[in-house]
Image (tube, rainbow, N blue to C red):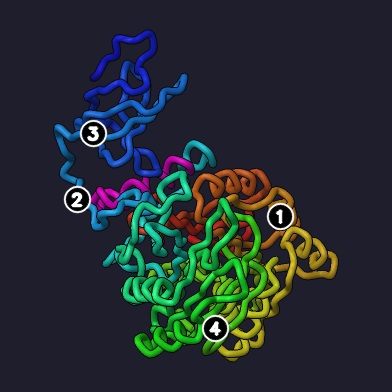
Amino acid sequence: MAKSTGNTPVQKNEQLTITIEDITHEGSGVGKVDGYPLFIPKTLPGEEAVIKVVKANKKYGFGKLLELKKTSPERVDPTCHVYCGGCQLQHMSYALQLQMKQNQVHNVMKKVAHLEHVPVHPIIGMEDPSHYRNKIQIPVDEKNGELITGYYQKRSHRIQQNQDTCHVHSHAMNEVLPFVRHLMNKYGVQAYNEETHRGELRHIMMRTGHFTGEMMVVFVTRTAKLPGKERIIEELTKKFPFIRSIVQNINDQRTNVILGKKTNVLWGAAYIHDTIGDLTFAISPKSFYQVNPVQTKVLYDKALEYAAIDENDVVIDAYCGIGTISLFLAQKAKKVYGIEVVPEAIEDAKKNAAHSGIDNAEFTVGQAEKVMPKWKKEGLDPDVIVVDPPRKGCDPEFLDAMMEMKPKRIVYVSCNPSTLARDLRILEDGGYETKEVQPVDMFPNTGHVEVIVGIQRKNTSKSLV
């Protein structure tokens, strides 16, 4: 174990040789100096590393890897030379990635939810954990008088370098992106400058239908004018006939929010389509649609299993988006009610239901915690409630509204195990029992993990297990 000669365990800029003992859920290695933890990105348990201390707080510090004296057998060569920070885990084997995520879910179930007795099933990984993303939002910048594209360096708004390919992007998007950048430079489109609030192009967004092959290209601009627009469209659609939609979104605000309020279709359709199982979904620029379509089918099949619905059940999908889970449920249930705060998403959900010939799904715009008490007063008593909230988890007001409705079963889909565990503890204390937990690897090479949980009201007869 390394030791420091300073008054504190380590000093900033000090170089140490340290053994990595553990790993965080974000993928940083953890080593200790006299019990003082140091977090070092790009290191793995069992490795001996020469590091430089870059920050030293009272209780822990951060280090930068300088050299590896001993490497882990789980270390692999990163697939991307840029290493932008988005794929924090690309230096570790996929088997270790899955183990790390499994441990993360186990830990929060034990330490946060205090439900260590609840079975956490082995995480469902991918056969090929590459090129899975069906949506990208690429910032643009200017370097040496040319527009460049790529991801920001960690904790900055600086693009490291032109990035033509990414190991998690779909092959089609890797093919189209450099040509779009070429056209922008060819026709004199200027990159947006955050400091001066000048220039035209802020982001390039692309969406693909994994199973249909359709693509949408979105130019997010500060101005309504896009130089060379007609010629850009002509060249782009000629080279890539699978492009079905070219859209301009206008965001003239000084903001970090990517999309603005105004969207114009420049060419083709307002939507592209993709399928999940037997259902077809229309996807617009602002639609929420899971980014990993292969694992989405796995996730939704598990949601159906945990919902355990039959033809007599009434279901509420409380964060329904464009109706993806709702329509899966509607194939089995008597009636499904979807709630979503984004009006455009509800319009998409209604179109998706009509397109799939589903007439037992009803969609409402609003906040679930406000809509559900109103429905309760009107006599709606759901058998099942499905929730798929954002990373912050469920608001206390929503959890109260859900428990007041007293559904027999709850299916909780989460992209943040910590807030999930917090909410499970609340539901347990409110008369519900967590039956089983299934992690799904929706985001290989990153520290994120999706989790789906089957929950049952205590003293009900229909069991999940």
Q: Nearer the viewer, residue 266 or 277?
A: 266
**Residue drawn where x is 49% and y is 59% of the image:** 452
Q: Earlier in the sequence, mark 1 or mark 2?
A: 2
Query: Left of 333 or right of it: where is 465?
Result: left
Q: Residues within 10 Å of mark 1 (few under 14, many from 20)?
A: some
Q: Residues within 10 Å of mark 4 (few under 14, many from 20)?
A: many
The residue type indicated by label 4 comes to Tyr
- Mark number for residue 398? 1
Residue 85 on the magenta segment: no
Residue 265: horizontal and vertical position, in percent?
Answer: 58, 83
**Residue assigned mark 2:** 76
Badge nearest the viewer, 1 or 2:
2
Residue furthest out toward the right:
377
Magenta segment = 90-108
**Do labels 4 and 2 touch, CB within 8 Å?**
no
Identify the secondary structure beneath mark 1. helix
- Residue occupied by mark 4: 271
Q: Which residue is mark 3?
A: 66
Q: Earlier in the sequence, mark 4 or mark 2?
A: 2
CA neighbours of label 3 inside 10 A, class few (<14), some (14 to 19), many (20+): few
Marks 2 and 3 close (CB-CB < 8 Å): no
Task: Calculate the distance from the C-alpha at mark 4 to the C-alpha at mark 1.
Answer: 32 Å
Amino acid at dot 3: Leu
Whether the residues at callouts 3 and 4 have beta carbons within 8 Å, the answer is no
Of labels 2 and 3, the one closer to you: 3
> How far is the residue under mark 1 from the one under mark 2?
44 Å
In the image, residue 383 above or below residue 57: below
Q: What secondary structure is found at the residue carrying circle 4?
A: loop
Q: CA distance from mark 4 to mark 2?
A: 39 Å
**Mark earlier in primary sequence (1, 3):** 3
